[in-house]
């Protein structure tokens, strides 16, 4: 870890004033400190934002709003979240460990960096960490890598479970920067790697995620997050599925489906949703999840696994009725 | 049969309170901090290293590289590590090899400076694929290439197989694994004059003294290694690794103590790993299930840096009765970090293949797999023909089957489901060799009424120190709390190091002999010392007191009265030299596995192990040992896989986040039953050893349960969900 300057402002304006250049915001620290120890991130200034008033979960006219500094565990246990959006609660509770969830913030969760082993090992090339240096994952150890949204520059998987649930629910993030405030749908917030895998999202220099907004969706009470991994806890997803279904009289009226662990960004599946709305079988609908998949030597199974995760979630939700 | 004690660990309070000082917890005055530099290519030559920026960095005291080396000599014995001394040449033999040591005033300064060092290599393509190397596998440089027993009139193992009513042949493979003990390897070295005192994480302080005396060209008498607490070893702290002599050599030239702690990532490469293996097993049986022939052709990877490999097929020679047996050994040499011993080397991988194959044979015969094992249970060692010293495997099978509900196992694979989960049962036989090494122990009775039991043994978290306390307390008839075990100091008598599951079997008898000798010396003192109240009397000893039939006095009071701070005796228990019997521990694992019918995750949901390991000294810690081996076996079966990148020879998942071992959620309640029959042919104590036994057979049991649940036979560990989709 390199030496850095440290500041702990009390308000958002103070934080934004300090931000820029080689600065990093510190919330729970569960990603940043890790990456600083590995020298993957070497900010000259760390701005501790934990004193900022960005906590809480509250209902607003445009939906349920989460402060970006709300801790994962607290958000997951919030009655409005657990009752109205089980998919969010489950995605959070299936993440990390209780210790980490007690520290990690929602905003930080959305901004966590990939777990790609090459990204995290500074002795290897990585286009995301060192643009233009190459991507050893294409022909290297790639069992955990993405099959959707990849490019010849980068196949790193987006690691967040929460983001998968939020993308399925059409959530937005509110951003504050020197130029003011803006709201960006989460689906547009993340950028696929293309030729510029180091640009992971539309966040501008010094801009801060302040809130997450989840629009009302009454039938999201019938939602689930299925996370599949080698061990039963404390591991990132090999594949996951965030699914909400509007079931009436045993028929799917509407559905939201997104998958995680398989995409370079949280991966919404409108084609699968449309097929479900059109009354296609679960199997036929889930098969559309594989569209455009580009498997590598070590991760071809993820194409099947993502479909199975969707089927498992659909089966769980159908059973629950 | 002696009653089985169940005692808390004597070292439990100091460990959970953080008071126990592990190697890295020592901070002698004037301490400087070392940080290893490691190679980033797997094979080739180091052309140059630029250390200028590091040398100018704050707090840096010295930067050592092959171009500015420390004086370290090659070991004379590999001892599970490698002969080449670090920094003595520019050859790169594996990715992650130690190529430098930065020493600074603080750990952070050493680490930051290390990041400033750059290296240039002339890199060759490494040999990094075991699968590609199999075709060119060669007989090993050490050890017999094959062992064979044939019945009279049988010309070859293949002839015996061909003559069998039913045969199966299959190939089983296992990946590289690594130990990931909780405590990373660490060394703290201090010099006083020409004498070295070193705290280093090791499974045997005597081993460390030997290797250091070679590496530093010193008289072993001038080296003292102190390491009473070890945070797990699993074989990886048997050897002495590069950072230890480097740290000692740096401390010598710098004239101040130096500490080096390996980073988590370095623990994957600077120290060794378990080799990859492949076994092609053929079993032949008559129609009633009697084994006619067992053939296992085993191949192990071997690091180009040393000679260690797993003789993985050999277990097939010691397990089931068959008149025709054949096991062979070959190796594939790879340019990877050092291959070394890991819990039940050869035998745990060997049992995965043999136990899987036994189930495959049972399927082919239409027999219950447990019945097949019972039918072929051996009463003598199948190769030597010697009778087993004490074997009650059949009782393990019977008791286990009954307790586990084996009769409820579905006879047809895939027949049992619970909701979305397919449910299967499997079993496997556990076994591990037993022996009794020579061990010396000192027992010191003190005037405060306490007793110190000393020897160079190691407690890796196993409970060995509590075994010392229990056995000494039993002989001396005092509460176990009054015994102070004193392990891990090379200045004490030479006891058995922690390896091969031989600690209790060797050290246990020695503790008893030494306690008896101390007791005898006390009785003699009481009778002969002029100031003794028992002078000239017929003195007896019982319950911590000496007496003459009338009066009795606690030994501490007597010593105080005589003005003696203590009275001690050292005894040596010899090696077991029996040629008349074969010695092994046995056991039977039973498990239930559930596999999700959508997404294929295998989850172990029930476990029972019935263990026949001779006398159990401390049921509580022994249970933990068995549970630990089973947990590691579940990891071996389902998770552990140290992946080598074929192109680079780099381990692709060399972090604790990416190298998966089980978490609590992966482990069901584990029941353990000990038969507790003393093996009196091995020693009066009758204890055989339990450190490695329970990992053997565990992965096979899981694989067999997965097959019973799904109908899928996975012959390539680990059994991950992608193999079950």
Image (spheres, coloured by chain):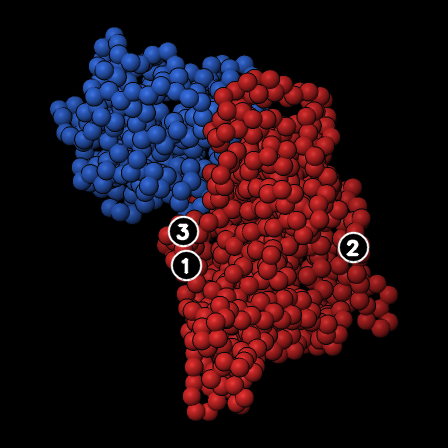
Chain colours: A blue, B red
Task: Farthest residue to the bottom: give it.
Answer: B549
Front position in the image: A112 or B270: B270
Q: Mark 2 points at which residue?
A: B143
Q: Label 3 to label 2, Cα distance in Å?
A: 45 Å
Q: What element carries label 3?
A: loop
- Which of disc 2 and disc 1 is earlier in sequence? 1
On-image quarter of the N terminus of chain A: top left
The answer, for residue B569, to whether it is visible in the render is yes
Numbered disc total: 3
Do the residues marked 3 and 2 share a common chain? Answer: yes
Please report contact status of discs 1 and 2: CB closer than 8 Å, yes or no.
Answer: no
Front position in the image: B674 or A84: B674
Query: Hey, which quadrant is residue B389 in on the image?
Result: bottom right
Q: Mark 3 points at which residue?
A: B19
Q: Could you classify mark 2 by the number of other residues whose Cα lies within 10 Å: few (under 14), some (14-19), or many (20 or more)?
A: few
Q: What element carries label 2?
A: loop
Q: Specify the subunit that label 3 lies on.
A: B
Front position in the image: A97 or A4: A4
Horizontal placement of A10 versus B640: left or right?
Answer: left
Q: Mark 3 or mark 1, which is nearer to you?
A: 3
Look at 23% across and 38% down and name the residue there.
A74
Q: Name the residue under label 1.
A: B12
Q: Could you classify mark 1 by the number of other residues whose Cα lies within 10 Å: few (under 14), some (14-19), or many (20 or more)?
A: some
- Which of disc 2 and disc 3 is earlier in sequence? 3
Residue B668 lies, with reference to residue A220, above or below; the image says below
Q: Mark 1 or mark 2, which is nearer to you?
A: 1
Q: Label 3 to label 1, Cα distance in Å?
A: 10 Å
């Amino acid at each position: 870890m390199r030496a850095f300057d440290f500041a702990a402002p009390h308000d958002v304006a103070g934080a934004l004033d300090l931000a820029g250049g080689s600065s990093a915001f510190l919330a729970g620290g569960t990603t940043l400190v890790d990456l600083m120890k590995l020298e993957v991130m070497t900010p000259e200034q760390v701005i501790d934002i934990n004193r900022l008033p960005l906590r809480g979960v509250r209902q607003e006219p445009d939906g349920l709003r989460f402060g970006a500094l709300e801790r994962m565990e607290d958000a997951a246990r919030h009655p409005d979240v657990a009752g109205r959006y089980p998919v969010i609660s489950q995605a959070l509770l299936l993440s990390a460990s209780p210790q980490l969830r007690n520290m990690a913030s929602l905003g930080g969760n959305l901004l966590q960096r990939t777990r790609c082993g090459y990204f995290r090992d500074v002795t290897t090339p990585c286009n995301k960490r060192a643009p233009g240096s190459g991507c050893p994952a294409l022909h290297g150890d790639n069992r955990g890598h993405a099959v959707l949204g990849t490019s010849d520059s980068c196949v790193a998987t987006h690691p967040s479970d929460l983001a998968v649930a939020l993308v399925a629910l059409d959530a937005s993030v509110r951003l504050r920067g020197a130029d003011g405030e803006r709201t960006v749908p989460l689906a547009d917030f993340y950028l696929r790697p293309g030729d510029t895998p180091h640009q992971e999202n539309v966040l501008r220099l010094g801009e801060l995620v302040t809130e997450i907004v989840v629009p009302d969706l009454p039938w999201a009470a019938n939602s689930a997050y299925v996370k599949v991994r080698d061990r039963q806890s404390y591991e990132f997803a090999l594949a996951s599925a965030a699914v909400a279904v509007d079931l009436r009289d045993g028929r799917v009226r509407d559905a939201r489906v997104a998958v995680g662990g398989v995409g370079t960004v949280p991966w919404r599946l409108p084609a699968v949703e449309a097929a479900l709305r059109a009354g296609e079988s679960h199997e036929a609908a889930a098969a559309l999840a594989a569209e455009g998949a580009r498997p590598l030597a070590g991760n071809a199974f993820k194409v099947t696994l993502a479909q199975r995760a969707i089927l498992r979630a659909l089966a769980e939700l159908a059973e629950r009725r | 049969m002696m009653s089985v004690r169940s005692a808390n660990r004597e070292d439990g309070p100091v460990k959970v309170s953080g008071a126990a000082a592990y190697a890295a917890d020592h901070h002698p005055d004037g301490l400087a901090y070392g940080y290893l530099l490691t190679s980033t290519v797997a094979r080739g030559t180091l052309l140059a290293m630029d250390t200028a920026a590091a040398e100018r960095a704050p707090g840096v005291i010295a930067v050592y590289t092959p171009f500015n080396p420390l004086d370290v000599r090659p070991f004379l014995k590999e001892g599970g590590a490698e002969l080449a001394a670090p920094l003595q040449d520019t050859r790169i033999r594996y990715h992650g090899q130690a190529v430098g040591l930065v020493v600074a005033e603080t750990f952070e300064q050493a680490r930051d400076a290390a990041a400033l060092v750059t290296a240039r290599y002339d890199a060759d393509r490494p040999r990094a694929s075991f699968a590609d190397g199999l075709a060119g596998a060669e007989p090993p440089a050490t050890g017999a290439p094959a062992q064979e027993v044939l019945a009279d009139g049988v010309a070859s193992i293949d002839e015996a197989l061909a003559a069998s009513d039913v045969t199966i042949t299959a190939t089983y493979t296992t990946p590289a694994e690594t130990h990931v003990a909780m405590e990373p390897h660490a060394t703290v070295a201090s010099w006083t004059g020409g004498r070295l005192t070193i705290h280093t994480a090791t499974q045997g302080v005597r081993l460390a003294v030997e290797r250091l005396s070679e590496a530093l060209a010193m008289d072993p008498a001038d080296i003292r290694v102190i390491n009473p607490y070890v945070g797990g070893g699993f074989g990886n702290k048997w050897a002495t690794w590069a950072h230890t002599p480097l740290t000692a050599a740096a401390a010598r030239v710098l004239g101040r103590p130096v500490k080096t702690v390996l980073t988590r990532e370095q623990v994957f490469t600077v120290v060794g790993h378990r080799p990859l293996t492949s076994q092609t097993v053929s079993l032949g049986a008559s129609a009633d299930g009697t084994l006619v022939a067992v053939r296992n052709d085993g191949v192990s990877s071997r690091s180009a840096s040393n000679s260690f490999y797993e003789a993985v097929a050999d277990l097939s020679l010691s397990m089931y009765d068959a008149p025709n047996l054949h096991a062979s050994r070959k190796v594939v040499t790879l340019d990877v970090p050092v291959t070394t011993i890991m819990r039940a080397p050869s035998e745990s991988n060997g049992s995965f293949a043999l136990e899987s194959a036994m189930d495959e044979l049972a399927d082919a015969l239409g027999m219950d797999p447990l019945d097949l094992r019972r039918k072929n249970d051996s009463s003598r060692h199948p190769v030597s023909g010697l009778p087993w010293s004490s074997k009650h495997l059949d009782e393990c099978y019977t008791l286990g089957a009954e307790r586990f509900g084996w009769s409820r196992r579905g006879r047809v694979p895939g027949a049992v489901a619970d909701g979305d989960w397919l449910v299967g049962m499997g079993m496997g036989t556990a076994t591990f060799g037993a022996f009794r090494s020579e061990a010396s122990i000192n027992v010191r009775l003190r005037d405060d009424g306490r007793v110190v039991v000393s020897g160079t043994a190691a407690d890796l978290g196993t409970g060995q120190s509590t075994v010392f306390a229990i056995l000494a307390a039993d002989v001396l008839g005092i509460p176990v709390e009054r015994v102070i075990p004193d392990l891990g100091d090379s200045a004490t008598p030479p006891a058995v190091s922690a390896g091969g599951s031989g600690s209790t079997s060797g050290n246990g008898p020695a503790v008893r002999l030494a306690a008896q000798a101390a007791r005898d010396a006390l009785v003699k003192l009481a009778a002969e010392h002029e100031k003794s109240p028992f002078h000239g009397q017929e003195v007896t000893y019982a319950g911590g007191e000496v007496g003459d039939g009338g009066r009795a006095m606690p030994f501490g009071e007597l010593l105080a009265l005589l003005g003696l701070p203590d009275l001690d005796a050292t005894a040596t228990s010899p090696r077991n030299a029996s040629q008349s019997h074969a010695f092994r521990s046995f056991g039977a694992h039973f498990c239930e596995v559930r596999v999700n019918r959508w997404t294929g995750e295998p989850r172990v949901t029930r476990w029972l192990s019935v263990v026949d390991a001779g006398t159990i000294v401390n049921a509580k810690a022994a249970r933990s040992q068995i549970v630990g081996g089973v947990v590691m076996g579940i990891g071996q079966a389902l998770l552990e896989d140290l992946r080598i990148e074929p192109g680079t020879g780099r381990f692709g998942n060399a972090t604790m986040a990416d190298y998966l071992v089980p978490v609590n959620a992966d482990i069901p309640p584990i029941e353990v039953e000990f038969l507790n029959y003393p093996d009196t042919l091995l020693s009066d104590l009758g204890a055989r050893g339990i450190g490695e036994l329970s990992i053997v057979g565990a992965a096979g049991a899981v694989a067999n349960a997965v097959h019973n649940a799904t109908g899928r036979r996975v012959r390539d560990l680990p059994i991950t969900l992608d193999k079950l989709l």
